[in-house]
Image (tube, grey):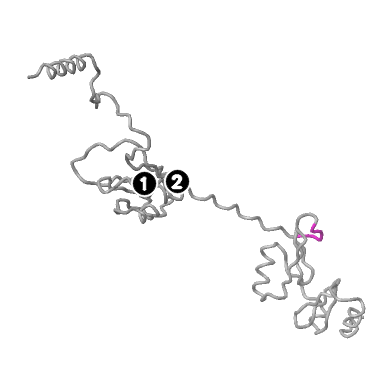
Amino acid sequence: MPKTRIMAFTWSTLKNLFSKPATKNYPAEPIKYPERSRGHIEIDIEDCISCSMCARSCPTGAITVDRKELTWAINRFDCLACGYCVIKCPKKCLHLVPGYQTPEGEKKEVSFKRPAPAPKPAAAPSAAPKAAGSASAAGKATLNGDIVTMANGKTMDLSKFPAEKKAEILKKLGLDAAPAPKAEAEGKATLEGDIVRLPNGKTMDLSKLPEANREKVLQKLGLK
């Protein structure tokens, strides 16, 4: 062997004796993965909405989503770690993290189950207003003919409803239907404030008419 090669070999041997090993001390020491390394897919299952966007975008079909059972599963043997599902996830609950899975001797899926959403609280039943005297300022509805004045100032014309529906509404509001005036029973129109009750049960609100037209209507109905 040439002298120069012997010297080079001797130098390499001495250098390696006093140098650190080139190999990693794995698994005694954890591996430090380089930045942006493609390890495996992880999911924050609590944030998942089971939209299946990840499953539809997976090129190998490694992801399975069951909306009915609230499960999300991935076959890591089929996963390419391309990260396309992470990009498509609308809730950003999928992550491509460093590190690889423990080797397995059997091909299987890893499944995660999303907790069921909490039931919505039942709405408190609204208390029906009690029977009113006369003033809506006390927070009660009042009845004037077929016109109901609510506590908030709004009005409801009951003449547009059938008799059964009208009775049901009055019962809910805690109001008793006012007995028909004697004149109405005899086939005559009656006047209650600005409300005219016709013999056929219909009502007419005179407050919306000009004064001259109001007088003509009252004269025509024999109420003036």
Give whichever of 69, 215 is nearer the camera.
69
Give whichever of 204, 76 is nearer the camera.
76
- Residue 82 is left or right of residue 10, and the answer is right
The quadrant of the image that shows the N terminus is top left
Q: Which amino acid, mark 2?
A: Lys
Q: On the image, numbered disc 2 is attached to which residue?
A: 92
Q: Which disc is residue 83 wearing?
A: 1
| Quadrant in the rendering for residue 222 | bottom right
Location of residue 76 in the rendering, given as x and y in whole percent from the top left corner = 28, 45
- Majority secondary structure of the magenta segment? loop
| Magenta stretch, residue numbers | 132-136
Q: Which disc is residue 37 wearing?
A: none
The quadrant of the image that shows the C terminus is bottom right
Q: Secondary structure at mark 2?
A: loop
- Residue 1 is left or right of residue 112, and the answer is left
Q: Residue at x 78, y 61 (%)?
A: 153
Compare marks 2 and 1 and give the one earlier in the sequence.
1
Q: What is the CA distance from the residue labelled 2 to the residue labelled 1?
A: 12 Å
Location of residue 39 in the rendering, given as x and y in whole percent from the top left corner = 32, 39
- Residue 116 is left or right of residue 30, and the answer is right
